[in-house]
């Protein structure tokens, strides 16, 4: 998460470009691995420890590769498809797989392969923007409430309770049913609005744990200001759970976008989205299941990649389960 | 204990007011509730003014909210704009959704906890790895995709079930929809139980129980499971509200005429009273379920005492 930069920069490069780092660091480990250097001179930080763990975790490597691939094709979809997702030929509606069109055509005669490729951009945009918004808003509010405590903390806790009591899909139906815009922003805005309490609760809890540490008391005794305490001492030590939950949440936001689009209140055509395509295909499920299976499969793999990544990061960061 | 319950009930009041107010505001920004009343045509100015007066829509929002809540506490949830009482709609819709939720919760408890115990005890073995992978897959595939696929396979291709549920919605018909509704939570319950069991397995009291020669089954059920279930119970408790609210998708797929169906219709037709009424009840269910969960803590873990 960009808002909290870990001083050592230990896990920088986890996201895009991680594959290169992976290859390089794997090589260096192999070099000094066998001669058994034993315990290192410098105690390793939680982050470098976690990073060492992650590099060897096949689940992490696979999901990181899938995510890198998804990010690349959302930035440059023309790399793997030359078609236009909005160019459709009604005479080919519902036809199956053909040479040059491996996934067949949908109900409007659009190429399913091209639409599936272009759908990645929408999903990744929604997921990344919603997660960034939720993580920034949630950790600022939760962090401040946890740090200062008292009245602001009670207000925040009760507010999160209120938001938790409202079922998410229901809130989405109510709020988004009036939106006519076909861009992704109302959906992202809604997710930030209803998603921040989840992160703020986590951030609040881990800030409260971190602020009682001795080094924070020591820094305070030395006269450090509140903002310095928060940014230099507490944030780097409280950010781990937020990163884990945010990564997993990214997957669920992608899934939520598809669900809302399925219900007809999320994204709207001409936006190309897996949710819209699945929703449209569900009407023809008996005759042409391929129209449903490809976008649904892409959706499932995307969500799976983010959830597995979050899972792997959590395992690496949580020493209790080692 | 009594004082704790009273304190919790008092704490529920602001949350209840806040979330109903939030929904009330959301529904009010959702557009003109009169618009749906004159058929496809626009209402003329005089009619719409009269209708607004009749339904009290000319007053400020906070006043509308207070009037509405006043009615709710006397058991009057208002009239849907089609003239049917909202309470009548609830009387037909809630039993269906409650049955669906019961089926889902049973799946969570029986399958989720069993799988969680098995994998937690066999951590790292093939059975653990494969179940873990399966739960990840279930979590990743959105409910509506799972639902559509099961409907296609079981309902259309193999003909094991009827693809859509009748208006009676008996327990038998709700088995597959219940499984679909439960699927994601089921996976979470499995993972939660697994983590909890794996953590507690190394604890002192389990070692003591094994050392004093108790049979393995008794150690697992009485000592290990009872202590490991606390986070699971919390999850299932908070999930009740989420399941009832999240049933919209499942009910839409299998054409079940429950709460989700009524809410969906209410929102499509901009039927304010229906939406706010149903959501108010859902919020209440959520809050009461959370309270019960907290009280259940004391039963499961005797160390927890409420002063």
Image (tube, coloured by chain):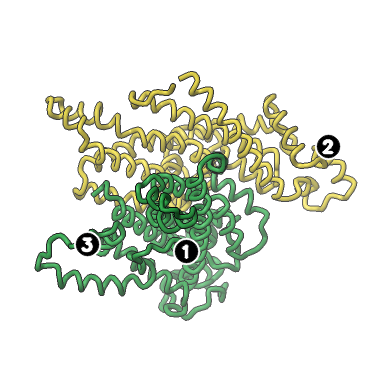
Chain B is shown in which shade? yellow
Q: Are marks 1 and 2 on the same chain?
A: no
| A15 lies above or below B197 | below
Instruction: Point out which mark residue A42 bears.
Output: 3
Q: Which residue is mark 1?
A: A291
Q: Residue furthest left?
A: A35
Q: Which of label 1 and label 3 is nearer to you?
A: 3
Secondary structure of the residue carrying numbered label 2: helix
Residue shown at 51% from the left, 37% from the top: B241
**Which quadrant would residue B256 be assigned to in this image?**
top right
Secondary structure of the residue carrying numbered label 3: loop
Rounded to the nearest angstrom, the CA distance separating label 3 from label 2 is: 77 Å
Chain A is shown in which shade? green
| B296 lies above or below B52 | above
Q: Is residue A248 something that shows in the picture?
A: no
| A163 lies above or below A279 | above
């Amino acid at each position: 998460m960009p808002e909290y930069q870990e001083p050592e920069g230990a896990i920088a490069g986890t996201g895009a470009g991680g594959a290169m780092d992976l290859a390089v660091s794997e090589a260096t480990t192999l070099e000094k691995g066998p001669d058994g250097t034993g315990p290192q001179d410098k105690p390793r930080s939680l982050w470098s420890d976690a990073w060492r763990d992650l590099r060897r975790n096949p689940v992490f490597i696979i999901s990181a590769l899938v995510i890198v691939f998804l990010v690349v094709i959302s930035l440059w979809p023309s790399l793997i498809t030359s078609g236009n997702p909005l160019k459709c030929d009604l005479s080919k509606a519902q036809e199956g797989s053909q040479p040059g069109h491996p996934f067949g055509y949908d109900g409007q005669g659009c190429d399913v392969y091209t639409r599936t490729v272009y759908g990645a951009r929408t999903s990744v945009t929604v997921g990344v923007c919603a997660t960034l918004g939720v993580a920034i808003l949630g950790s600022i509010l939760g962090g401040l409430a946890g740090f200062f405590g008292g009245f602001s903390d009670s207000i925040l806790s009760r507010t999160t309770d209120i938001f938790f009591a409202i079922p998410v899909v229901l809130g989405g139906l109510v709020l988004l049913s009036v939106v006519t815009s076909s861009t992704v922003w109302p959906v992202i805005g809604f997710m930030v609005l209803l998603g921040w309490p989840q992160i703020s609760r986590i951030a609040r809890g881990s800030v409260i744990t971190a602020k009682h540490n001795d080094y924070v008391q020591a820094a305070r005794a030395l006269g450090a200001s509140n903002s310095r305490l928060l940014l230099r001492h507490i944030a780097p030590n409280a950010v781990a759970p937020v990163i884990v939950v945010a990564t997993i949440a990214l997957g669920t936001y992608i899934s939520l976008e598809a669900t809302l689009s399925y219900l007809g209140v999320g994204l709207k055509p001409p936006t190309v989205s897996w949710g819209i395509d699945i929703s449209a295909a569900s009407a023809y499920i008996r005759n042409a299941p391929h129209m449903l299976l490809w976008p649904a499969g892409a959706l499932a793999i995307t969500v799976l990649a983010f959830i597995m990544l979050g899972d792997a990061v959590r395992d690496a960061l949580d020493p209790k389960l080692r | 204990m009594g004082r704790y319950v009273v304190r919790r009930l008092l704490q529920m009041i602001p949350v209840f007011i806040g979330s109903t107010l939030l929904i009330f505001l959301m529904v009010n920004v959702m557009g003109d509730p009169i618009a749906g009343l004159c058929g496809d045509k626009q209402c003329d100015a005089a009619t719409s003014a009269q209708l607004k007066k009749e339904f009290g829509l000319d007053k400020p929002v906070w006043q509308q909210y207070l009037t509405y809540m006043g009615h709710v506490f006397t058991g009057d949830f208002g009239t849907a704009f089609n003239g049917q009482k909202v309470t009548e709609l609830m009387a037909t819709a809630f039993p269906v959704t409650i049955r669906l939720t019961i089926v889902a919760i049973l799946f969570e408890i029986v399958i989720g906890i069993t799988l969680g115990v098995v994998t937690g005890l066999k951590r790292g073995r093939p059975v653990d790895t494969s179940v873990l992978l399966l739960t990840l897959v279930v979590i990743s595939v959105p409910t509506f995709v799972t639902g559509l696929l099961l409907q296609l396979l079981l309902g259309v291709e193999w003909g094991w079930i009827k693809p859509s549920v009748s208006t009676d919605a008996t327990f038998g018909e709700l088995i597959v929809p219940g499984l679909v509704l439960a699927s994601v939570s089921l996976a979470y319950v499995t993972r939660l139980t697994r983590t909890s069991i794996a953590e507690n397995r190394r604890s002192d009291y389990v070692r003591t129980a094994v050392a004093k020669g108790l049979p393995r089954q008794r150690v697992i059920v009485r000592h290990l499971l009872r202590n490991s279930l606390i986070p699971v119970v919390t999850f299932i408790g908070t999930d009740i509200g989420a399941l009832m609210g999240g049933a919209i998708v499942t009910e839409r797929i299998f054409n079940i005429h429950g709460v989700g169906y009524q809410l969906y219709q209410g929102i499509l037709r901009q039927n304010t009273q229906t939406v706010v009424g149903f959501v108010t009840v859902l919020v209440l269910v959520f809050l009461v379920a959370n309270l019960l969960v907290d009280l259940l803590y004391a039963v499961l873990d005797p160390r927890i005492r409420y002063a």
